[in-house]
Image (cartoon, helix red, strand yellow):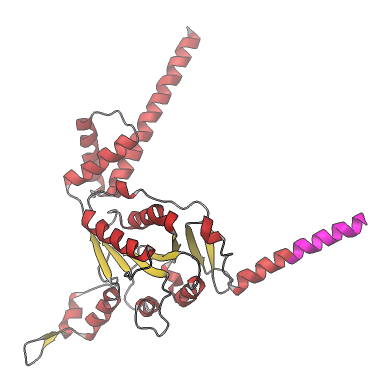
Amino acid sequence: MGRLAEIGLRLQRVLELGERLLAELAGAGPDPKVFECCLAFRWDADRGPGRLVPIAEPQLFDLDDLIGVDRSLEKLLANTEQFVRGLPANHVLLFGERGTGKSSAVRGLVARFGSRGLRVVEVRKQDLLHLPRVLEALRGAPGRFLLFCDDLSFDAGESRYRELKAALEGSLLSPPANVRIIATSNRRHLLPESAADNLAARLDEAGDLHMGEVVDEKLALSDRFGLVLGFYGFDQATYLSIVDRYAAQAEIPTPRADLHAQALRWALERASRSGRTARQFVDDLTGRERLARADDASHHRDASAGG
């Protein structure tokens, strides 16, 4: 009986493994209970038709640390509040200079509204062809979902943006009521623009300006986001305010004047005054100061032992 029982257990494990494999290949969604405990997911299109995969420890962000983008953040929070409450809300495009907090704002929404049922699903640009399948996987799922496309832009000749455009508006199959699309980009219109695009513009007999077909096509995508928010570069005072906040959190003892002088040199070397630059500077300074303190402590221990 012992031998038969062992064979039975092995067969059971094989069957369970086979069921999991078939579920992956079939693109089956996760157990609805996972939406209760996980805040973030990603769309995995590497096996089969694609599936939702929970992110065990998502990198969240405290929106109180987002400085210098108050107006855009206020509108984003209001739109998200409407969405979480089940009220009409828009799809969102966050555009602007690198390092100004666009992606951090999205991560911060999950941190602030996660306890109220907000979830985020990250979809890579190369997987936008799967967008109809992603939307269908979320239809009827418990909670409210932000479908997140980070650092989104398209080169000339790319066609994947058409799936996104159809999902935003224009397709007979509309996004589920519990899903809104949010994207970040360095480009206001997501597609490259050139002076040649404007050559087809013309004035009609009434003096009205009509843009060319190429320009119309490029504007059509960003126009389908109901809320388009700009995240612009920071002036020196704002940059230093961000440095001060991160330095206080890290409990850096460097005098304020010296801290600012180092922070400005760091920004000058990188040709960037952004929240990301401030965070990188404070991380570097924190590491250097803690390393120096550890080396000093080690030196004193060695000196005491030698004495």
In the picture as drawn, the residue positioned furthest to the top comes out as 307
Range of residues picked out in magenta: 1-15
Q: Residue 197 at x, y = what percent?
A: 20, 79
Query: Quadrant of the rendered structure where residue 184 is?
Result: bottom left
In the picture as drawn, the residue positioned furthest to the bottom comes out as 205
**In the displayed structure image, the side of residue 249 where residue 67 appears, left or right:** left
Q: Residue 167 at x, y = what percent?
A: 39, 77
Name the residue nearer the viewer: 257 or 87: 87
Q: How many marks?
A: 0
Q: Against 301, is 76 above or below?
A: below
At 27% across and 57% down in the image, what residue appears? 73
**In the displayed structure image, the side of residue 279 where residue 32 appears, left or right:** right
At 66% across and 71% down in the image, what residue appears? 22
Q: Is residue 39 visible?
A: yes
Name the residue nearer the viewer: 220 or 269: 220
Does 20 lie within the magenta span?
no
Q: Quadrant of the N terminus?
A: bottom right
At 22% across and 80% down in the image, what residue appears? 215
**In the displayed structure image, the side of residue 249 where residue 53 appears, left or right:** right
